[in-house]
Amino acid sequence: MRLASYNSTIVSLLLGLLVLAAPSIADDRLRPYLLLDRSTADAGATTATIRSRLEGSGFTVVGEYQPYEGATAMAVTHPALLQAAADAGPFGGYGAVLRLAATTVDGETQVSIANPVYWGEALQVGDVSPVATALGSAFPDAQPFGSKKGLTEKKLAKYRYMMMMPRLRDHDELGSFADHATALATIRNNLSNNNAGLSSVFEVAIPGRDEVLFGVAIADGDGGDATVMATTDQDELRHTAHLPYGLLVSGDTAYALAGKFRIALAFPDLGMGTFMKISGAPNAIRDALATLTAP
């Protein structure tokens, strides 16, 4: 009897320790977005306040647009984020900006931003802790969201949606040029003059490197911003800070993250059934961005 009682006590203690450890384990998991504000106040005023707080913490808004009614998508960067992108080496430019969004849902405005730690790990940018600290200072009550269970840093570092799906390294090569300057000139010209529903949202140069990240709005086709989000973005808290897509000029070549990687990373809980409803989007996004490299 004493042995049984002793064993029972040990089991109870172990279970208690597991319960105590559970929050710590959960906290190690990352979500793709942070909710900065949620209110019924005027959307324009709310966005202006958020923007002011970001700028007061060293962030710079580098572009914005309205992908569809009720949504404003923005992009911000920070000196520490640009430095991390530069230090990451080739293709670090993918992580040079954070997407920010204000979305009106049933009379309520949600303001969210891409979680710098989540995206920093997934895009292998390196140490973005100064960026996370600056963001946390401006918004100490920010709430992570975008995935019920979240993903660990280890999972994000080699992320793919499922077997046979692309990883970070499997990005799309869109076109090559004689040199870096020619690549930039061609893409800028095509963004200014195209009939494919593409427009420039931002352009950010990576310090000390021949890398420039363009943010591109896509208005039309299977890969159009509104088309993709109408199918995928149905949760209570919206993932508008997924937009816009990026085109990276690295050296004399233009690249973009594979659509199946990029969309899945922004919607890590997306079911295969929903993914199949936008099966044409990844190639459509790639093909649309590739038109910007035409001479």
Image: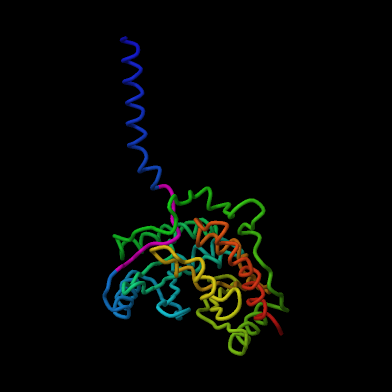
Query: How many numbered callouts?
Result: 0
Q: Nearer the viewer, residue 241 or 238?
A: 238
Q: Residue furthest top?
A: 1
Q: Nearer the viewer, residue 163 or 88?
A: 163
Q: Is residue 133 visible?
A: yes
Position of residue 233 measured from the top left corner of the image (x, y, whole percent)? 47, 66
Position of residue 77 measured from the top left corner of the image (x, y, whole percent)? 44, 71
Q: Nearer the viewer, residue 139 or 80?
A: 139
Position of residue 12 measured from the top left corner of the image (x, y, whole percent)? 32, 25
- Magenta span has 235? no
Please name the residue shown 67% across and 82% down the image.
182
Q: Which color scheme is applied?
A: rainbow
Please name the residue shown 26% across and 75% down the image.
41
- Magenta span has 33? yes
Q: Is residue 131 visible?
A: no
Quarter of the figure that contains the C terminus: bottom right
Please name the residue shown 45% across and 74% down the image.
75
Position of residue 36 measured from the top left corner of the image (x, y, whole percent)? 33, 66
Question: Which quadrant of the figure has residue 290?
Answer: bottom right
Q: Nearer the viewer, residue 164 or 213?
A: 164
Reply above or below: 60 against 266. Answer: below
The magenta span reads 28-38
Quarter of the figure that contains the N terminus: top left
Question: Which quadrant of the figure has residue 133?
Answer: bottom left
